[in-house]
Image (cartoon, rainbow, N blue to C red):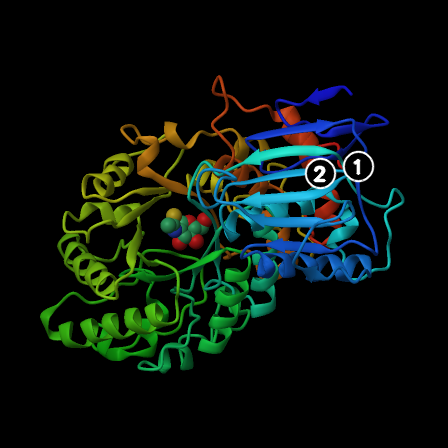
Amino acid sequence: MARVELRTCTALQQNGEAVTGIIPAPVDIEYTDAAPFVLTGRSRFVAVGDAASVAETFAARARIATGFDLPVVAGEAAASDIALVIDADAGAGFEAYTLTSGADGVRISAPGPAGLFWGTQTLRQLLPAEIERADAARVPAEGWIVPAASVADAPRFAYRGSMLDVARHFFPVEDVLDHIDRIALLKLNVLHLHLTDDQGWRLQIDAWPELTGIGASTSTGGDGGGFYTKADYRRIVEHAAERFVTVVPEIDLPGHTNAALSAYPELNCDGVAPKPYEGTEVGFSSLCASAERAEATDRFLADVMNELAAMTPGPWLHVGGDESLATSEADYLDLVRRITAAGAATGKTVIGWHEMGASRELPAGTVGQYWDFVTPRERAAELTTSFVEQGGSVILSPADVAYLDMKYPDDPDGPLGRKLGQLWADGPTTLEEAYSWEPASIVPGLAEADILGVEAPVWTETIAAAPELEFMVFPRITAIAEIAWSPAPAGGSRDEADFHARLASLGTHLDALGIAARKVAGVTWL
Ligand code: TNX
């Protein structure tokens, strides 16, 4: 039996058409010409070890699309079954997994549930796209086949993020849950929620009720407000946790605070609450550093950080720190010290945008998020390495390749007939640009081990509804997900044609999910 080794993970060819391709590319994948696995009405999920809940998450989706019973059971797996096996030797690291598929069944093995879950996301992509459907109305012509394959996989970076700005425009809980499900398909494991900004405060804080009472009523462009109750936030966190996604909440401080300042006069140096803001400027608002306001400001910081930490099971709190252009340098350093101390006092690890590296008093382990360009300008590189010098690590989000709110080059109308996106980060961003950067080559002096991970932010000044979000995020987020998960390419450059072929295949899944992805030129969409 011939073994087709596909070093670069090119899709299996059938009648010259790509039928399958995994994004992000696994470390190792071999398709064979052996008989495929077929999921049928007799198939079961056989859980071995602590695998039942991962099996159930996948089975729930598969039942809806197939109409099959697909029970989750213990015991011996038959050739018609999918076995999910916890096995300490199945790979290095808690997110590693192996997968084999063929006429003898599917077997996914991993040292722990997280790896097992990522294995099921690979299986999701190996199945026909109809597996994504929210009803069982369409049976794939070839049946529910999984090509015979053998995969061994593990992520390059521990932190693989998608950031959603719910402050400039509010996105209801259901939209956020959908987004989590989609990023999990790409093995992204962090949802960074940008919860506060000048235009809105989106999270209930009991000790400061007007943050949402007043501060949540607005958005950019006068499109109405909204906020998450604590129960809403917990729903998001739980939905994410079931998909091995950690929520990183961001309260942006000390700038980007007009919504909070408009809700509480005592947070303002002049004691006067500014009007709510619905424009798109940045850098005009600031918490007050002066001694007269210290009691109110520090109580605000402690209350917000404590309530936020109490409802956040993940290890990180993001405290912002970007573009505080209305804060003097001395005040900025003073406020960053107090903000990061309040965050760290909760026991969480603090994350801040790279400007916070100006402080030499960061709590141990503070993580810096780099948002300058692929080629750092001005002080961006030194501000970033400052986090590492102080014992922390770095997340890379170079704006000219990883900001998904940048326009596409041909600036098409969005799905709701409006122009979307921004140009400030060195003009539009193509799919190829999003795919063509190397995390270890951005900030001089950063070693691989200093890089916690990679994140793709989407800011929503111009993006007001879920289809618009989908149109800007997909497909470029698939490029960022691959950079975050897959090994650094041998020889330094990634194989764009291979990526395009796999993306064409993934595109059928995005279609079946009903995602309004931008069908960029250069990909032969199926
Ligand atoms: C910069 S870079 C911002 C956001 C804007 C975004 C628009 C950074 C950390 N902040 O405040 O929404 O550009 O692209």
Q: Residue at x 29, y 77 (%)?
A: 273
Residue type beneath disc 1: Pro
User: In which image quadrant can residue 482 be found?
Assistant: top right
Classify mark 2: helix, strand or loop.
strand
- Tell me where residue 329 appears, x and y as whole percent: 16, 52
Which picture quadrant has residue 193?
bottom left
User: Mark number for residue 224?
Assistant: none
Q: Name the residue rendered at 62%, 24% in the picture.
A: 8
Q: Image check: 309 left or right of 507? A: left
Q: Nearer the viewer, residue 148 or 310?
A: 148
Mark 2 nearby-residue class (10 Å; few <14, some 14–19, many ≥20): many
Residue hosting label 2:
101
Q: Where is mark 1, residue-wise?
A: 36
Contact between labelled residues 1 and 2, with CB atoms less than 8 Å apart: yes
- Quadrant where the N terminus sits is top right
Query: What is the residue that sits farthest to the left in this orientation?
Result: 291
Between 293 and 21, the residue placed more toward the observer is 21
Total numbered labels: 2
Q: Is ligand 1 closer than 8 angstroms to the Cβ of mark 2?
A: no
Q: Using the rendered image of the protein, determine whether residue 134 is visible from the camera's viewpoint.
A: no
Where is residue 360 drawn, in percent x and y? Answer: 14, 47
Say if 62 sits above or below 290 in the image. above
